[in-house]
Each structure stands twice: as C-alpha cells, then as structure tokens.
Amino acid sequence: MKRRTFMKKIAGLSLGVSLTTLALPNKAKSEIIKPFAKLVADNVLDDDLIASIKALKQHSPGLIIGETHSHSTFSDGGHSVETIFTRGATLGLDFVTITEHLTHDRYFLEQNIASIEEQDRVRKYWNHEGLKPPVCYPALEVSTNMGHLITLFPEEYYKPNMLKQIHRYFQTFDKSLPPAESVARLTCAMGGVTIIPHPGISRSYPFGMPLSYIEHKFVEYADSIEDICTAHALNEKYSHRFGLASIGASDDHLNILCGTTVTAFQSSKYPDLQHAIKKRGTMAIRVSDKLDPLFTPVKLFFKPSNMISSHI
Ligand SMILES: [Zn+2]
Ligand SMILES: [Zn+2]
C-alpha cells in the first residue's frame, strides 16, 4: 500500500474510532485502538523513528534522548511497563519515563507505587538480548487543583526506603485535589523536578494548567514545561516565554507515540535529566510528524470543551 493511501486510511480510522468511542472508558477505547496502533508501529512508524533518532545522535554525539510522559496499564495506558520499555529501547531512546496518574477520585497512589516497583523489576531482570534497558525515573502525573503536574524524582527513589518517602508524603493526594504549589514545593524539597504537561489545554477538569496562572503564580514553583507534545498536537515555545526548561513528550497511552517527540540534553554538560532540567539545559525535539493525521482531525472536529475523555 502506498504510504499516502495508508496514512489516509489511518486518519479516517482514527476519526471514526474517536467519534464512536469517546463515551467509552479509556481501557475499552484502548482495546479498540490497539490493532491499528500495532499496524502503524509495525509498518510505518518505528523504522522512521529508529533512523531519525540515530541521525540525531550522529549529528550531535553525546546527546541523551528520551521520553518524559507516558502511561502504562497501572493507570489509563493500554500496555505493560515491560512492553513500553522494550519499544523505547528498540527505538534507541536513552531514557523512558512512565508517569501514571495520581487522581484523587480515580487513580490512587498504590497503583503509582506498584508501577514504580514494576519499572525497577523490569530493569533489574532485563533479558532482551542486544538491547540496553532504558534509564528510567520514578515519576507521577498528579492532578492538582490547577491542572496536571508531573513530578520526576532521581533514580535513587527506586530503592524501597526512598520509595517509602513518596508513599508517605504523597498519600494525602489520594483524598482531594492538592494545591499545585504544595505539590511543586514538596517535589523540590524531595530533590525532584516538576514538568507542566499539556499547558493551556482544557478538556476535563483538572487538565492543562491555565497559561495566565502559570505566568502570574506558578512559574516560580515549576522547573520545566512541555513545548511540544504529540498527543495534544502541541507545538509552542512556552519555555522561552516563562523561562523554564523545554520539554518534548508524547503523553503516550498506546505505546505508539513514544519517540515521536523527545526531550534531549548533552551528557557532556549534565549527568542526568534532573540536572539538565534544573539548569534549563534541555531541548524539545519533534522526531516525526507522521502521526499528525491521528490527532489533527480530532483536534479540528472537537472544541476543547467538548472533549470528555481525560486523554486522547
Ligand atoms: Zn495529563
Ligand atoms: Zn499524561
């Protein structure tokens, strides 16, 4: 099948699936989309991503490239932690961050902790010959009173005694929407960094932080912000506007978007992602726009206020 015909088919299918399944729960929606997600990944996308990521590294030796925003079956994603890490490694990503939701009425801290433990287990017992396991960081996407906020911790938080601290300090967020400032202050005090995901995008409440709130109140608490995000067709320069570190992410729930937009930093300048974010040394890079047809029709068709799903 010619690539143009193929992408046209995918775009139509995507719109159809979105129209007919928006009222379904995320898990059911994910099951419906899975077969064509695999079709896209197997036939078109992955080879392009592998080649583009390789080219980026050849062009800039020492560049560390990875994903900062994705979801597994421990919250509303459709794939296991191991599947996500394996595909990320196959694509040539150096790090893959899984950010399960922590939402007071739906996704609870126990699931976040279980996901973080599973990430550690998968990495420890990695048995994919010829593939290096990606670096990963314990992270959560917390629903705050002003919108989602990603909190990303150093790798040492995989140790059980450190993980207990996340359990201890984050458990109150199970019960009600916490103030965004409190979550950011706590994360900073614990040695982590914050990322503002999908800024300015309003779907369900809470979702993206309002830009005016970021500008006037939250900018002093935040470390970084998504400039580019595949799942939300976001492509802005908010990091320049607000003086924050620049993040590129996919917000992947289906294990197909990961790698299409990435965050990168120079390993000669920064030892890890946290340091790069703190020093505003990260870059958002759009690796592939081949999945745009999956999202632009939906974006054009629905006004933001009509979107009733929390993601995708
Ligand atoms: Zn979100
Ligand atoms: Zn998300």
Image (cartoon, rainbow, N blue to C red):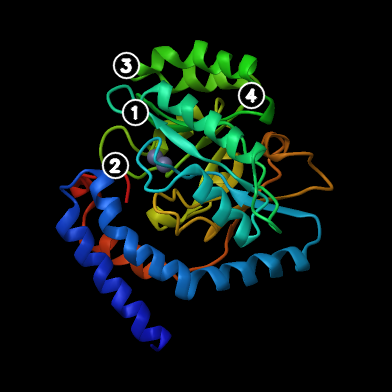
Residue placed under numbered mark 3 in the picture: 176
Indicate if the residue with disc 2 has its beta carbon within 8 Å of ligand 1.
Answer: yes
The answer to the question of whether label 1 and label 3 lie on touching residues, with beta carbons closer than 8 A, is no
Q: How far apart are marks 4 and 1 (CA)?
A: 20 Å
Residue pictured at 19% horizontal, 51% vertical: 22
Horizontal arrangement in the rendering, residue 279 relative to residue 179 (left or right):
right
Quadrant containing ligand 1: top left
Neighbor class of circle 4 (other Cα within 10 Å; few <14, some 14-19, many 20+) is many
Q: Looking at the image, do the residues carrying marks 2 and 1 touch, with CB atoms under 8 Å apart?
A: no
Q: How far apart are marks 2 and 4 (CA)?
A: 28 Å
Residue type at tag 2:
Ser
Q: How far apart are marks 1 and 3 (CA)?
A: 12 Å
Q: Which mark is residue 107?
A: 1
Q: What residue sits 50% from the left and 50% below the top? A: 83
Give the residue type that dot 3 points to.
Ser
Label 1 element class: loop
Q: Residue furthest right?
A: 268
Please tell me the numbered disc located at residue 157: 4
Marks 3 and 2, how far apart at CA: 18 Å
Relative vertical location of residue 24 with respect to residue 293 in this rendering, above or below: above
Q: Earlier in the sequence, mark 3 or mark 2?
A: 3
Q: Of circles 2 and 4, which is in front?
A: 4
Instruction: Report which residue position mark 2 lands on.
Output: 310
Distance Cα–Cα, label 4 vs label 3: 24 Å
Element type where label 2 sits in the image: loop
Q: Compare marks 4 and 1 and give the one earlier in the sequence.
A: 1
> Which numbered disc, 4 or 3, marks the residue that appears first in the sequence?
4
Tell me which label, 2 or 1, sits earlier in the chain: 1
Task: Determine if residue 151 is in view.
Answer: no
267 versus 55 height, above or below? above
What element does badge 4 sit on?
helix
